[in-house]
C-alpha cells in the first residue's frame, strides 16, 4: 500500500472515529504497577480542600492488571482511557521464565522467542492472546504485542513485528475479540532509530490509531545530544505521517517532547526513567540470587521528584536539599499532595507527589494555545531549573555533601534550540 493511500485511509478513519483527547492534546499517562496503585488511589481521592487529580489516560502494567485490583474498576467507572502494557518485549530471553508475574500471564510462551523458532502460528497466538487479555480487563484501547527491533538479525525481527501487527489487525473485531482502536507498540534499536522510514512505512500499512514507542536503550538523563536527537527524529517521523505517538518511559523529558510536538508520554511514578531491555533481561548472578534468597537484595532508593529541578533525585540527595533552610523554600509544593503538609514525610508520599506535580506540569503545557507558547514555557522552566540546580550544587558542596549533577538540563535546552526539530507549524 502506498504512503498516500495509507494517509487517505487514516484521514477517513479519523473522520469516522475522531482521535481521543489523550492523543490530540498534551497528556501524561502514568504507568501503574503494583507499587503505584495506592498512590494513584490517594491522588484521585477528593478532599475538603481539593477535587483530586483528574487523569486523562493511563498505562496499566499487565502483571498488575492480572491481579484485578479495585483501582481498575474505578478507572473503568470513570471511563478513563486505559492501555495494558503486555511485556511481550521481555519474552525473547529466558529471564522471564524466572519471574512469576511474567511467566504466569495467560499469553506468555513456554520458551523464549528466538529467531530460529518463531513462526506465524506463534505470532498469531501471541497477538490474539494479548488482545484477549486486554478485552478481559475491559480496556477501550488495545496495545498490541510486539518484539524488539534488535540490531542483530534486524530483518527477521522486523518481519516478526509485521506478523504480530497483521495478526492483531485481523483479530480485532473478530468473533472472539471486540473491535477497539489499536495502538501499535514499537521497540526500536539503534538500526531502527537511524532508519525510521523502515518502521514508519510498515506502520502505514495497518489501521492503527497510534504508536507506543519504547526504545531498547534510552536514558534521557545520561544520553548525549546526538542520541536524544535521533530519538526525537524517530518520533517525529512517525507523527509526521499522521500517526499519533506515545513516548514510553521518558520521565520529565516528556515535557521537552511535548514542546517539540509529541503530545503524549508515560512514565512510572517517581522513577529516574530509562529504557534498558538488556538490563531487564539480564540473568542475575549467583551472588545476587543468594542475596535475594537471604532477603538482602535491598530495594531502590526512595527517589523524590523536585518539580523546580525537573529531576527525580536519589533520596539522600533530596533529603540533603530539603534539610537546608536556605534551599527548601525554593522547593515548596503547592499541589494537593503537599499543600497542607511539611517536607518531613515527603518520601512516604513520593509517588502521589510525583503524579500531582507531573499532571500540573502537563496541564500548564496543555493550557498554552500555540506550539510556540509551549516551547517557550518549557524552555523557561528548564532555565529556571538550571538556576535552581546551580544554587543546590553550590550549597551542598560548601557543606561538604555529595551534590547531584544536572547536565541533562543543558542538553534538553540545547535540543529545544535546534530549529530543524521544531514542528513546521510551531511558529
Image (spheres, rainbow, N blue to C red):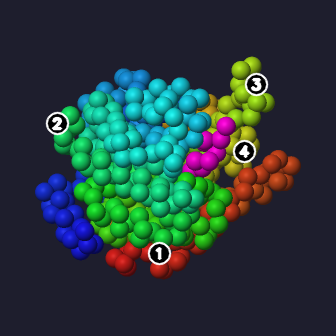
Disc 2 on helix, strand or loop?
A: loop
**Residue shown at 60% from the left, 71% from the top:** 226
> Which residue lies under the disc numbered 1?
421
4 vs 1, front mark: 1
* Residue 177 visible in this rendered orientation of the protein: yes
Q: Distance of mark 1 from mark 2, alpha carbons?
A: 44 Å
| Magenta span of residues | 274-283
**Residue shown at 62% from the left, 34% from the top:** 347
Q: How many marks?
A: 4
Disc 1 on helix, strand or loop?
A: helix
Q: Find the residue positioned furthest to the left.
A: 16
Give whichever of discs 4 and 3 has the lower sequence position: 3
1 vs 2, front mark: 2
- Residue 373: where, in percent of width, then height? 40, 70
The answer to whether 53 appears left or right of 138 in the picture is right
Q: Which part of the image, by quadrant, shows the N terminus?
A: bottom left
Q: Quick check: is 161 in the magenta stretch?
A: no
For label 3, the crowd category at 10 Å Cα-Cα, with few meaning under 14, some 14 to 19 and many 20 or more, is few
Q: Is residue 22 above or below residue 101?
A: below
> Which residue lies under the disc numbered 2?
175
Give whichever of discs 4 and 1 has the lower sequence position: 4
Marker disc for residue 317: 4
- Residue 50: where, in percent of width, then height? 38, 35
Residues at marks 4 and 3 touching, judged by CB atoms closer than 8 Å: no
Disc 3 on helix, strand or loop?
A: helix
Q: Distance of mark 4 from mark 3, alpha carbons?
A: 30 Å
Marker disc for residue 290: 3
Query: Within the image, what quadrant is residue 108 found in?
Result: top left
The answer to whether 170 appears left or right of 359 in the picture is left
- Residue 258: where, in percent of width, then height? 43, 62
Q: Distance of mark 2 from mark 3, alpha carbons?
A: 49 Å
| Of residues 421 and 65, the one drawn nearer to the viewer in this rendering | 65
Amino acid at each position: 500500500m502506498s504512503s498516500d493511500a495509507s494517509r487517505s485511509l487514516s484521514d477517513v478513519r479519523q473522520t469516522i472515529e475522531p482521535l481521543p483527547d489523550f492523543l490530540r492534546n498534551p497528556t501524561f499517562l502514568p504507568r501503574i504497577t503494583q507499587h503505584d496503585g495506592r498512590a494513584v488511589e490517594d491522588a484521585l481521592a477528593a478532599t475538603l480542600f481539593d477535587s483530586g487529580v483528574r487523569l486523562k489516560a493511563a498505562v496499566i502494567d499487565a502483571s498488575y492488571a492480572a491481579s484485578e485490583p479495585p483501582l481498575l474498576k474505578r478507572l473503568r467507572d470513570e471511563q478513563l482511557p486505559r492501555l495494558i502494557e503486555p511485556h511481550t518485549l521481555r519474552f525473547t530471553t529466558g529471564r522471564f521464565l524466572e519471574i512469576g508475574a511474567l511467566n504466569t500471564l495467560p499469553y506468555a510462551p513456554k520458551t523464549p522467542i528466538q529467531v530460529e523458532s518463531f513462526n506465524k502460528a506463534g505470532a498469531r497466538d501471541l497477538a490474539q492472546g494479548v488482545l484477549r487479555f486486554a478485552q478481559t480487563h475491559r480496556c477501550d484501547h488495545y496495545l498490541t504485542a510486539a518484539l524488539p527491533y534488535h540490531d542483530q538479525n534486524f530483518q527477521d525481527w522486523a518481519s516478526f513485528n509485521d506478523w504480530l501487527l497483521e495478526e492483531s489487525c485481523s483479530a480485532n473485531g473478530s468473533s472472539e475479540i471486540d473491535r477497539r482502536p489499536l495502538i501499535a507498540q514499537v521497540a526500536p534499536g539503534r538500526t531502527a532509530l537511524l532508519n525510521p522510514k523502515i518502521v514508519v512505512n510498515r506502520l502505514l500499512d495497518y489501521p492503527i490509531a497510534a504508536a507506543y514507542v519504547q526504545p531498547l536503550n534510552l536514558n534521557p538523563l545520561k544520553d548525549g545530544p546526538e542520541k536524544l536527537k535521533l530519538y526525537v527524529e524517530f518520533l517525529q517521523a512517525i507523527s509526521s505521517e499522521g500517526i499519533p505517538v506515545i513516548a514510553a518511559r521518558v520521565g520529565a523529558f516528556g515535557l521537552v517532547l511535548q514542546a517539540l510536538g509529541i503530545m503524549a508520554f508515560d512514565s512510572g511514578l517517581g522513577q529516574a526513567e530509562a529504557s534498558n531491555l538488556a538490563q531487564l533481561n539480564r540473568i542475575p548472578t549467583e551472588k545476587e540470587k543468594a542475596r535475594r534468597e537471604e532477603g538482602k537484595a535491598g530495594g531502590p532508593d526512595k527517589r523524590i521528584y523536585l518539580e523546580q529541578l525537573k529531576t527525580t533525585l536519589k533520596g539522600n540527595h533530596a533529603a540533603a536539599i530539603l534539610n537546608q533552610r536556605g534551599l527548601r523554600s525554593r522547593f515548596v509544593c503547592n499541589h494537593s499532595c503537599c499543600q497542607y503538609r511539611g517536607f518531613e514525610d515527603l518520601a512516604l508520599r513520593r509517588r502521589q507527589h510525583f503524579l500531582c506535580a507531573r499532571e500540573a506540569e502537563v496541564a500548564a503545557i496543555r493550557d498554552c494555545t500555540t506550539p510556540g507558547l509551549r516551547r517557550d514555557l518549557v524552555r523557561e522552566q528548564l532555565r529556571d531549573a538550571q538556576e535552581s540546580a546551580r544554587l543546590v550544587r553550590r550549597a551542598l558542596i560548601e557543606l561538604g555533601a555529595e551534590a547531584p549533577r544536572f547536565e541533562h538540563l543543558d542538553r534538553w535546552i540545547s535540543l529545544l534550540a535546534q530549529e530543524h526539530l521544531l514542528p513546521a507549524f510551531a511558529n
